[in-house]
Amino acid sequence: MAPSNSESASIIPQPPDGGPPAARASASDAPPLPAPSPFDPPEHEREWITVAMELAPAFAARAAELDETAELPIENLRALNEAGLDVALLPVVHGGGISFRAFGQVLRIISRACPSTGCLWLMHMGAAYGLVTMSDEESARYYAAELTAGKRFANALSEPTSGNMFLVPLQSSVPVDGGFRLDGAKRFVSGCEIADHFLVNTLVDGIPNFFGVERDETISFVPIWDTVGMRATRSQLVSFEGTVLREERRCRPSSGEQTNPIEVGLAFLSIGVAEAAFEALAAHASARVIPATDAPLSHMQWVQFAAADMHVRLQAATLLAERSLWLADLRSPTAHTAAVEAKLYANQVAKEVADLAVRVGGGSGYLRTSPIQRHFRDAQAGALMAYSVEVCQDIVGRAVLGVS
Ligand SMILES: Cc1cc2nc3c(=O)[nH]c(=O)nc-3n(C[C@H](O)[C@H](O)[C@H](O)COP(=O)(O)OP(=O)(O)OC[C@H]3O[C@@H](n4cnc5c(N)ncnc54)[C@H](O)[C@@H]3O)c2cc1C
């Protein structure tokens, strides 16, 4: 049964036998949720969080191997679809209707277990949700049906030249029969090799336009993705050679009011990684006995002080991120700014927590066999993903200083 908000202790999932608190810290347990807050998902949506918590242990068990082999977590992605989570976020008319608040918690749980799966799922959902909500009625129905059937979606937005400014493409398409012809490349397209549909942006008459593009023989992949972290996302370069972007799959111009899952989700990707890093840090601090004091590292004051700081920062990052989801659910125009602020902070906190985990882990945490080094590598990605921390700082800094 889904945990209830009215439980006095918290909504932290309990072991089935109500075992001791220490048992909850094990890596195979379902990840804890924060204490009840006004930003929590509605009670009737808690079943989705339970679903994610049930899937998470298997995802966590495969994460190290996927990092090693850099293979796509196809089994995990299929499980998410089969559990109904792909469709859940779509508008009610297409069979979904869950809140962004529930979506964020689900993403956080998945990312904590396996960040590559979290990243792939977020990009898949962002592209599919974008195509369903920005297309005309007939195309929206088509994309919703494709998503329901388990088809895969990817965002082909960042260009080698535009980089972080992914909403401002520099590549143009030229008119041809039935649409526009695109010759160009998009870089770091997570899950592109298994994608059936791409959300692509390009200049048409000098104006950015989104299109839905089906995979065909004009689309190929250049294997550039040999990275430090997030290895199983296989975010390759996608080459378009004479690809026709069909007029009927051109999206409506964005009103700027709609929130996209990626916008509010990226903070939760980092929060999931940060939580996993903190858990590994705590486990090592409890297990490693230092001969000089004959006590575990966790008894040392510097470790306690540093862990306290990270715990509080992580809570603050989570609250900021949850607030952005709450505003998105309210369709508040401030949701966009809140999401930028939340991403900026969550990206930084993930790197800080992972850095502390390396310090506490010592040489043992530096070994390839330790989860700590993997969390450290994965924690770097969020800050690089658009908008990068620096671009977020630029947006927020200009706003708070009144610079246009
Ligand atoms: C794990 C991962 C998954 C990804 N998945 C996808 C995906 O599915 N689809 C997709 O389209 N893209 C994806 N991306 C791409 C991502 O969103 C960014 O666009 C990309 O990482 C930017 O890389 P770049 O080398 O072009 O960086 P650049 O944009 O060149 O940035 C380099 C440096 O310059 C700074 N900088 C750049 N522009 C500005 C500015 N205007 N103001 C201040 N500083 C600036 C940056 O902060 C950074 O420090 C992914 C990236 C990663 C790491």
Image (cartoon, grey):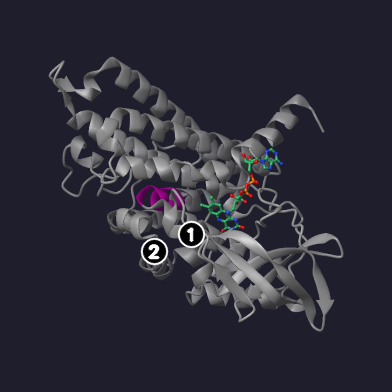
Q: Main secondary structure of the magenta part?
A: helix
User: Where does the N terminus fall, quadrant-wise?
Assistant: bottom left
The answer to whether residue 40 is seen in the rendering is no
Q: Which residue corresponds to the image point at 27% horizontal and 33% vertical from the top-left?
A: 363
Q: Which residue corresponds to the image point at 45% horizontal and 37% vertical from the top-left?
A: 350
Q: Which residue corresponds to the image point at 43% horizontal and 49% vertical from the top-left?
A: 229
Among all residues in the image, which is located at the extreme bottom? Answer: 177
Q: Position of residue 303 (x, y in %)?
A: 30, 21
Against 279, residue 234 (above or below) is: below
SS category of the residue bearing label 2: loop
Amino acid type of the residue that numbered disc 1 sits on in the rendered structure:
Leu
SS category of the residue bearing label 1: helix
Against 30, residue 129 (above or below) is: below
Residue 73, numbered circle: 2
Cβ–Cβ under 8 Å for marks 2 and 1: yes
Amino acid type of the residue that numbered disc 2 sits on in the rendered structure:
Pro
The one of 166 and 314 positioned closer to us in this rendering: 166
Q: Position of residue 293 (x, y in %)?
A: 15, 16
| Residue bearing mark 1 | 120
The answer to whether residue 150 is seen in the rendering is yes
User: Is 109 left, or right, of 189 in this rendering?
Assistant: left
User: Is 14 left, or right, of 404 in this rendering?
Assistant: left
In the picture, residue 84 is in which quadrant?
A: bottom left
Q: Which residues are magenta?
A: 106-113
